Image (spheres, rainbow, N blue to C red):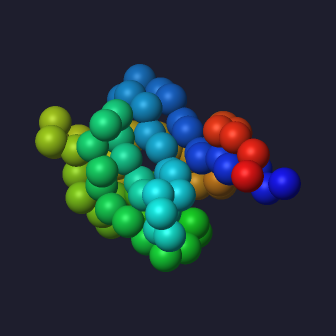
Amino acid sequence: MKSVFFYRHVNRFGTWTIAMIGELWEIAHEDQTLGRYNWLAGAHGDLVRGYCYHPSNGIDPADCELPDDLADWERVRVRHR
């Protein structure tokens, strides 16, 4: 059985997620999709550096104190396949 999971980071700027949606890793702030990527590392790196779409509230993810190390994000298990 394989675990299905996503990454989440909650801070004063809201909830940030990196989740596998279909075949791509999707980055999001609250319920807004900020981009989709083939690789987890690319999704995480672009989000942390702000090289993605910005949320409609105008904040730049690069200024939101997101952890550079994915190990510092919460890994949330959704289910087993």
Residue farthest toward the top in the current orientation of the protein: 12
Residue at 57% across, 66% down: 40
Q: Is residue 69 above or below residue 75?
A: below
Looking at the picture, how far across and down is residue 49, in whole percent? 41, 61
Looking at the picture, how far across and down is residue 65, in whole percent? 46, 40
Q: Nearest the camera: 44 or 20?
A: 20
Q: Is residue 71 above or below residue 74?
A: below
Query: What is the number of callouts on the image?
Result: 0
Tell me if I can see residue 63 in this picture.
Answer: no
Q: Nearest the camera: 47 or 23?
A: 23
Quarter in which the N terminus is drawn: bottom right
Residue farthest toward the bottom in the current orientation of the protein: 38
Residue at 30% across, 50% down: 33
Picture quadrant where residue 34 is located = bottom left
Residue at 73% across, 52% down: 81
Tell me if I can see residue 15 in this picture.
Answer: yes
Residue farthest toward the right in the current orientation of the protein: 1
Left or right of 41? Residue 79 is: right
Left or right of 79? Residue 32 is: left
Q: Nearest the camera: 43 or 38?
A: 38
Looking at the picture, how far across and down is residue 64, in whole percent? 39, 40
Picture quadrant where residue 16 is located = top left
Left or right of 24? Residue 31 is: left
Q: Is residue 58 above or below residue 18?
A: above
Residue at 59% across, 45% down: 7
Picture quadrant where residue 2 is located = bottom right
Looking at the picture, how far across and down is residue 21, in whole percent? 47, 58
